C-alpha cells in the first residue's frame, strides 16, 4: 500500500501506549535508529523505517510521510525475536493438568494443537516484554514417535494470532528406555518408502487414465501428512542427538528430498560439515551443557558457535521451557560469549527461525510484516529493556500480569489490601 502524501512533521511525537489498541490506525516513521535489518543490507546507522497498514513500506526514504514520527535517538531497532519449540499458549501451569493442552496419549502425526491455543495466556504478555513478537509452539505428543504438528502465532494476544498452523511434523528419534532406537528409525523409513511408492503409483495411474480417474482413493489423514513431507510442503522436525542418528536422518533427507530440521542435535559439531553440506538448520539451546543421556555427551556451550562457523544455520531456543522463553535474548548473548558471531546470533533468534519454519517475518525489509522492537541498548545485555514494540504494525502494551500484581501489592492504600487493584 502506498504511503499517504503528507507533510513531514517537524515536531517529534511520542507514541502513546493508549493508542496500541487502534488497529493499523496510523502510519509510523521511526527515525534516527540503529537498524539491524538481518538482511544483506546489514546494520544501518541513523536510519528511518516507515510502517503502514501492518507492513514495512520504506527504509531510508528520501522524504518521510507518516501520521506519527518517532525519534529513536540512536537506539537499537531489530526484527521481533521468535521463540520456538515450547508450549506457549498450550500450557498455563505445568503442574495443573487442566491447564495443559500440549500432549495426549493418542497424539500422532495428525495432532494439531493450534485449535487449543489460548492467545490470552498470561505467558504471552510476559514473553512479549523480552522482545519476542512471535512463537513457534510445539506439542509434547504421546506414545507415538510422531509428536504432532507445530504452529506459529504472533504474540499480540489477539484471537486470530495463529498465522501458520500445522507448519511442521514432529518426530522423536534416538534411545529408548524399552527396545531399540532402530525400531522408530525403521518405522519412519518404511512410512516414507510406502508413501513414495503410493505417490509414484498414483502418478502412473493418473498418466494412464487421466487425472480424474474414478478409481482414485482418498488417502487417510495420516497419509496426507506423510505425502506433504514428501512434496516438501512442510518440514520434518526431528528430535535427535547422537551423531549416528543425525547421519541417518540426513540420509533420509537426501533419499526422499525432505525439508529437514534437526532439533537438539547434541552431537551436531561431530558431523557439522555433513549438516552444512545438506543445508539443514539446527534448532538448539545455547545453554545446554550437561548431558541428559548417553546420546547427548557432546553438549557444550560452544556448540552454537561451532555450527555457525561450519556454515550451519542455527536457531536458538530456550529448551522446552514455556515459562522461561523470555530468556531467549540472554541465551543468545551467552552464545556470543562462547564463540558465536553477534550478527549470526541475532539471525538465530529472528531470520533463521523464520526460514526454518517458513514464516514471513524475522527481517526488517520493505514488504515484510512490521514486527519490530526498539531496545534501550544492546538487546543481548541483561540490563537492556524493550522500549517500544510493534506487531503487524500495531504498537504493543509492555505490561504483564506480573507487573499488575507487583503494582497491586506495592501501592499504598488506607483500605485493606483486598480492596486495592
Image: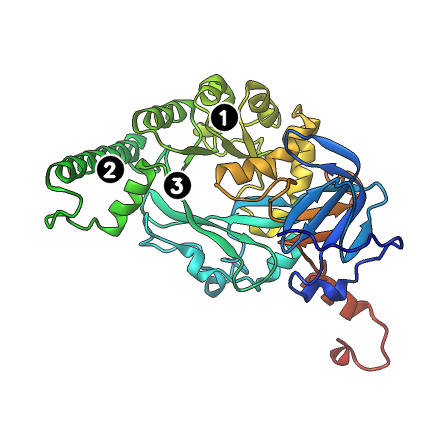
The CA span between labels 2 and 3 is 16 Å
What secondary structure is marked by label 2?
helix
Q: Say what secondary structure mark 1 lies in.
A: loop
Q: Quadrant of the C terminus?
A: bottom right
What element does badge 3 sit on? loop
User: Residue at position x 49%, y 37% from top?
Assistant: 356
* Residue denoted by label 2: 191
Frontmost residue, 383 versus 38: 38
Rounded to the nearest whole Å, what is the CA distance between mark 1 and mark 2? 30 Å
Front residue of this view, candidates 419 and 258: 258
First of labels 1, 2 by sequence position: 2
Mark 2, other Cα within 10 Å: few <14 / some 14–19 / many ≥20: some
Q: Mark 1 or mark 3: which comes first in sequence?
A: 3
In the image, residue 144 sits, relative to residue 280, either above or below, namely: below
Question: Which of the two marks, 1 or 2, is nearer to us in this view?
Answer: 2
Above or below residue 236? Residue 243 is above
Residue at numbered disc 1: 297
Mark 2 and mark 3 lie on one chain; the one further toward the N terminus is 2
The x and y percentages for residue 207 are 15, 36
**Crowdedness near tag 3: few (<14), some (14–19) or many (≥20) residues, C-alpha within 10 Å:** many
Amino acid at each position: 500500500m502506498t504511503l499517504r502524501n503528507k507533510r513531514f512533521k517537524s515536531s517529534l511525537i511520542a507514541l502513546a501506549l493508549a493508542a496500541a489498541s487502534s488497529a493499523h490506525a496510523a502510519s509510523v516513521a521511526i527515525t534516527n535508529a540503529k537498524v539491524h535489518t538481518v538482511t544483506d543490507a546489514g546494520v544501518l546507522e541513523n536510519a528511518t523505517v516507515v510502517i503502514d497498514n501492518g507492513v514495512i513500506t520504506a527504509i531510508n526514504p528520501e522524504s518521510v510521510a507518516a501520521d506519527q514520527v518517532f525519534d529513536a535517538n540512536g537506539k537499537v531497532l531489530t526484527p521481533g525475536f521468535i521463540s520456538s519449540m515450547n508450549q506457549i499458549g498450550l500450557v498455563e501451569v505445568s503442574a495443573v493438568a487442566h491447564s495443559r493442552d500440549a500432549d495426549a496419549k493418542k497424539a500422532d502425526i495428525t495432532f494439531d494443537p493450534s485449535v487449543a491455543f489460548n492467545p490470552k495466556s498470561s505467558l504471552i504478555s510476559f514473553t512479549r516484554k523480552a522482545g519476542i513478537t512471535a512463537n513457534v509452539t510445539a506439542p509434547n505428543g504421546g506414545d507415538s514417535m510422531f509428536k504432532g504438528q507445530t504452529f506459529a502465532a504472533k504474540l499480540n494476544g489477539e484471537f486470530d494470532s495463529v498465522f501458520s498452523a500445522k507448519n511442521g511434523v514432529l518426530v522423536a528419534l534416538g534411545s529408548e528406555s524399552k527396545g531399540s532406537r532402530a525400531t522408530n528409525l525403521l518405522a519412519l523409513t518404511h512410512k516414507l518408502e510406502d508413501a513414495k511408492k503410493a505417490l509414484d503409483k498414483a502418478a502412473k495411474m493418473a498418466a494412464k487414465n487421466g487425472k480424474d480417474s474414478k478409481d482414485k482413493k482418498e488417502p487417510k489423514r495420516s497419509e496426507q501428512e506423510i505425502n506433504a513431507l514428501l512434496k516438501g510442503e512442510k518440514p520434518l522436525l526431528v528430535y535427535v542427538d547422537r551423531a549416528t542418528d543425525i547421519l541417518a536422518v540426513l540420509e533420509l533427507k537426501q533419499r526422499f528430498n525432505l525439508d529437514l530440521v534437526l532439533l537438539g542435535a547434541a552431537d551436531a559439531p561431530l558431523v557439522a560439515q555433513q549438516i552444512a553440506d545438506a543445508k539443514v538448520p539446527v534448532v538448539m539451546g545455547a545453554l545446554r551443557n550437561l548431558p541428559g543421556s548417553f546420546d547427548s555427551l557432546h553438549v557444550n556451550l560452544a556448540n552454537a558457535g561451532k555450527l555457525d562457523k561450519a556454515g550451519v544455520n542455527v536457531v536458538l531456543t530456550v529448551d522446552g521451557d514455556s515459562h522461561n522463553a523470555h530468556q531467549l535474548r540472554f541465551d543468545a548473548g551467552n552464545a556470543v560469549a562462547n564463540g558465536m558471531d553477534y550478527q549470526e546470533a541475532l539471525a538465530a533468534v529472528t531470520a533463521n527461525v523464520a526460514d526454518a519454519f517458513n514464516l514471513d517475518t524475522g527481517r526488517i525489509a520493505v514488504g515484510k510484516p512490521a514486527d519490530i522492537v526498539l531496545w534501550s541498548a544492546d538487546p543481548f545485555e541483561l540490563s537492556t529493556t524493550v522500549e517500544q514494540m510493534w506487531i503487524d504494525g500495531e504498537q504493543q502494551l509492555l505490561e504483564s500480569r506480573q507487573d499488575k500484581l507487583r503494582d497491586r501489592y506495592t501501592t499504598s492504600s488506607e483500605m485493606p489490601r483486598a480492596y486495592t487493584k
